[in-house]
Amino acid sequence: MIECNQLTRTYTSGGRALTVLKDITLRIDAGAFTAIVGPSGSGKTTLLGLLAGLDAPTSGSVTLDGHQLNQLDEDGRARLRAERVGFVFQSFQLIPTLTALENVLVPLELSGEPDVARALGLLSDVGLAGREHHYPSQLSGGEQQRVALARAFVNQPAVLFADEPTGNLDARTGQTIVQLMSELNRKHGTTLVLVTHDPALAALARRTIRLTDGEVVSDTTT
Amino acid sequence: MKPGFVLTMARRESRASGRRLMTLALAIAAGVAALVAVNGFTSNLRTSVARQAQAMLGADLAIESRSELGTAARALLDSLDGEQAQYVAFSAMTYAPAGTTARLTQVTAIGPCWPWYGAIRTSPMSAWGRLADGRNAVVDPSLLRALGVTVGDSISLGETRFQILGTITEAPGDVGIRSALGPRAFIPFRYLDATGLLGFGARAEYGSYIQLGEGADAQRIAADWRPRLREERARIRTVADDQNRLDNALTRLGNFLGLVALVALLLGGLGVASAITVHIRRRIDTVAILRCLGATGRQVFGVYLTQAALLGLAGGVLGAVIGLLVQQVVPLVMTDLVPAELDTGPAWGVALAGVLLGGWTALVFALLPLLAVRRVTPLAALRRDVDPIPAGRDPARLVAIALLVLSVVTLAVLQAGNWRVGLGFAVGIGIALLGLRLAAGVVIGLARRLSRAPLAYTSRQGLANLQRPGNQTIAVVLALGFGAFLLAALALTQHNLLATLDVSGEGVTRPNLALFDIQSSQLDGVRGVLDQGGVEATAPVPMVPMRIASVEGRAVSLARRADSLPDDSLPRGWAVRREYRSTWRDTLVGSEKLLDGTWWDDPRTGGPARISIERDVAQELGVGLGDNITWDVQGRPIETRITSIREVDWARFEPNFFVVFEPGVLEDAPQTWVTMARVDDPATRSRLPRQIAEQWPNVTSLDLTVVQAAIEDLLGRVSLAIRFMALFSLVAGLVVLGGTVATSRDQRIRESALLRTLGARAGQLYRIVVVEYAALGLMAGLTAALLAVGAGWALARFLFEIDFAARPLALVLVILVPAALAALVGVWASRDVTHRTPLETLRRAAE
Ligand SMILES: Nc1ncnc2c1ncn2[C@@H]1O[C@H](COP(=O)(O)OP(=O)(O)OP(=O)(O)O)[C@@H](O)[C@H]1O
Ligand SMILES: [Mg+2]
């Protein structure tokens, strides 16, 4: 489902080159639930961004759902995201000007088939039935993240990327969110890539990849 | 690209930021309203003129000439079937036999029957029909007031008297300002000679109105006869000619006002650009999320562009509605400036054009700030620290700028109806904006320095707020400043124009009474009357009427059309055909400046007489130093040579001349005299003309205070119309200001909540707001005042060629009014900021 080959990302800032990811080669199978862990600054977000095609590697390549990302242009990658990829972010990233329902609908609008019933169904799956017309500012952090989850699953993505989706939530709410994610993963067969600091959450995943200083230091599957 | 997504998102996005984006629509609405109002008015005016053109002439055809009709004119008149009415129009003094004052009157001696089309309405109604019955007159009501007489009384005109049958209440084609030059009086043609007023030196227009018989083609007749009539210095006019001329004049007036209105629209566009910039800044996160979710750069760009265009269209609709309403008011501010009874029906075509224009303006002005949206990286949704818009040049910017410039120029050219004026206008706007921008930079820099000065905390905070990130200070200063600048420049120019004409102001000692057309034999008598009245008069100036016979030995042919002989080097046009009134003098006067050649300091020696010619006329005639002109002075040829070229300051009530002769040439030619006097006592000023008119009816007295009042009135009306249109720019500026208040609202709410949490009282919060907005308005006003002085000076110096004086009081107003307005808007918009609890605001601010 996801493959990367000798992935390297170097930033140049202030004339100094900083290699954040070094020669990462991985394979993630379809339907798997993978956690990426590691200390702050180890390159987790950078890796996620590269795997999802949000950023271009300095060298190396990524294949996502059978597509060579570096052979697609920005619009091509966007189309791929619209059809096959879902995201959950640490800071929820709901669109503040849209209601919960409308936020969930966005990916469907993008592919031109807004299915309100589907969106409502997902909102009720994440326990937000009745809150669909509320704006993000009218929802608590946990509720916002659940809307984000519903949005991430609404276009039945092949892959869901989540970058510390619980980072802004208390432990209990965080646990619920990740449980929800893994339920949805099971229900829809979605490939799940979760970046987290939290060992308890990482434990929910079958496979854990540990990064330190831009390198994979361990890769364990239970 | 799926249009469904773009439209849906555009709609949902707009709904959520309604208040902020509404101001964008309002900014467009102000400009569209101004344009629709003025263009709708002009278009109605033109339809009205077309409908009433025949009634304005009152005939099918008219012939007119500055001298009695010649043989060709008479041959034409004889050859026509149908009816004719002869007329002679001239200025003369009228007075009541028992009264103490006299008034310069525009007299028309008119034959019976005219007008055949339309009607002259009088009070009482039967007056016009009875005019020809005897020694009767129908006059403007203002003459009755000036002379203190009523209908039924008699007035003296020349050597006879006329009984006033009634007053004119309405005549076709009446332009109110015309009667400001002197009230009108109509008398029967057959009693013209009895007045004895058409002697030597009289200025009169001789003509005939013609109603053609069945099947005659006025246009054909006019075209056939025009060359021959031109040779006799006569003109022929048809209804269509008049309509054309009037149509052109009105279109020019409309176009000019339209350009002023266009300023409002462009300022609205500026407001759009500014609002979009801020809007986009707020939406970067949303854009990044959308990109993450798979929207392409073009789709997101489409969302916001659609949003801007839709809002522009909405603003256009609102503006068109307002414009159609305002259009009903425009005739009020244009009173007496336009002839024809006005249609006031809504001009749908103009309104539709206004709506589209609103949409387009919003689109092109939004384009530039929106381009950045295409380049927002989806990575920004994932991490805070990444720069959402990657650095680097975007070639699309050039395209957007080109489109914007092209749009502005096209709009200006269309509105000006002439590409040179349009281009000049566009460049002028550009320069003015640049000037404002520079001045604004200076003023803003000052404010920044002040915000670090040891002031009260609230003042410093208010000033510092102007520099908060994402501030629109520049946009507001430009938009608000431009309106104030327009109004101020207008007021300054009007003031300076009037100052040069001022004969009645305090401390002015210029002459305020002019006596014209004095015959040589009457000179001593007139001076005697002035002496008796204790009035000191200037030395009388002689005037000799003459025409050009030949230039450089070539006889001027009047029949030649400008286009018929392209390589004909002879001068053409009015400068050749007109009658010159020249004088002789041995010195230059104060209003003259020698530009080239030498003045005659030595006595005349023989050869062609030396003359000095005014620069502009020399240019029109295509003559220069050393060229010979032969004049026809009452049938006698006089050879002259140009030995100097002068510049003349015409902007004063002083006898000035295109051509001045050296002494010793014209002394024996038939001549009239002009003398001027300063008469401070109004009673004397009205009594003297009366006394003179009684003894010498041909002498024309002009009370310059009356003329000054008339010009002031005219200028006042013109500037009222312009000011009215310029007001829309100020409104657009205020809307832009309101827009920035709305856009920075969330931010200010958050700041106040924070300050409140830290213990600020409501009063302190308000003080901060007042300082912030008053400073903003002050900057706009200061910038406007600076630029207005510059523009006013340039206009006075180069266009009107008059002295310039800044009016400190007016400038203070220009500076203070925007400040007060801005402070009001700021306080009003912040009224509920302090009513919310800090918790509520902090929570909302999280969005
Ligand atoms: N645009 C950039 N320019 C320079 N350095 C960058 C840039 N983006 C990220 N980095 C650096 O790359 C390194 C890895 O960052 P990354 O965000 O991937 O770490 P992370 O593992 O997600 O950390 P955290 O757990 O704190 O989110 C950090 O040292 C960061 O400072
Ligand atoms: Mg991270």
Image (spheres, coloured by chain):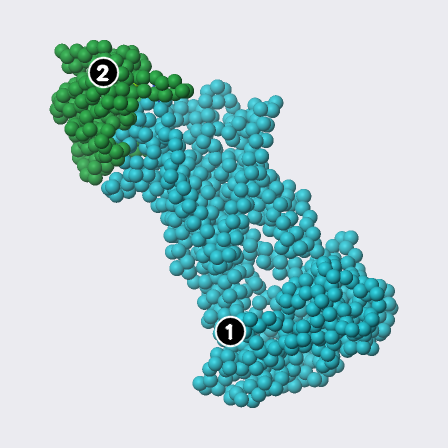
Chain colours: A green, B cyan
Quarter of the C terminus of chain B within the rendering: top left
Residue B414 lies, in percent from the top left, at: 45, 57
Quick check: B458 left or right of B295?
A: right
Task: Give the CA distance from mark 2 to mark 1.
Answer: 88 Å
Residue at 81%, 73% (x, y): give it.
Answer: B606
Quarter of the N terminus of chain B within the rendering: top left
Q: Which chain does tag 2 point to?
A: A
The residue pinned by badge 2 equals A36
Q: Considering depth in this image, is B838 or B551 the residue closer to the camera?
A: B551
For the residue carrying disc 1, how many other residues have a C-alpha within 10 Å: few (<14), some (14-19), or many (20+)? some
- Quarter location, residue A38: top left
The residue pinned by badge 1 equals B241
The type of residue carrying mark 2 is Ile
- Quarter location, residue B123: bottom right
Q: Considering depth in this image, is B473 or B632 the residue closer to the camera?
A: B632
| Mark 1, secondary structure of its residue | helix
The type of residue carrying mark 1 is Asp
**Image height of A198 relative to B810, above or below:** above
Verify CB contact (< 8 Å) between mark 2 and mark 1: no
Is any atom of residue B377 visible in this view?
yes
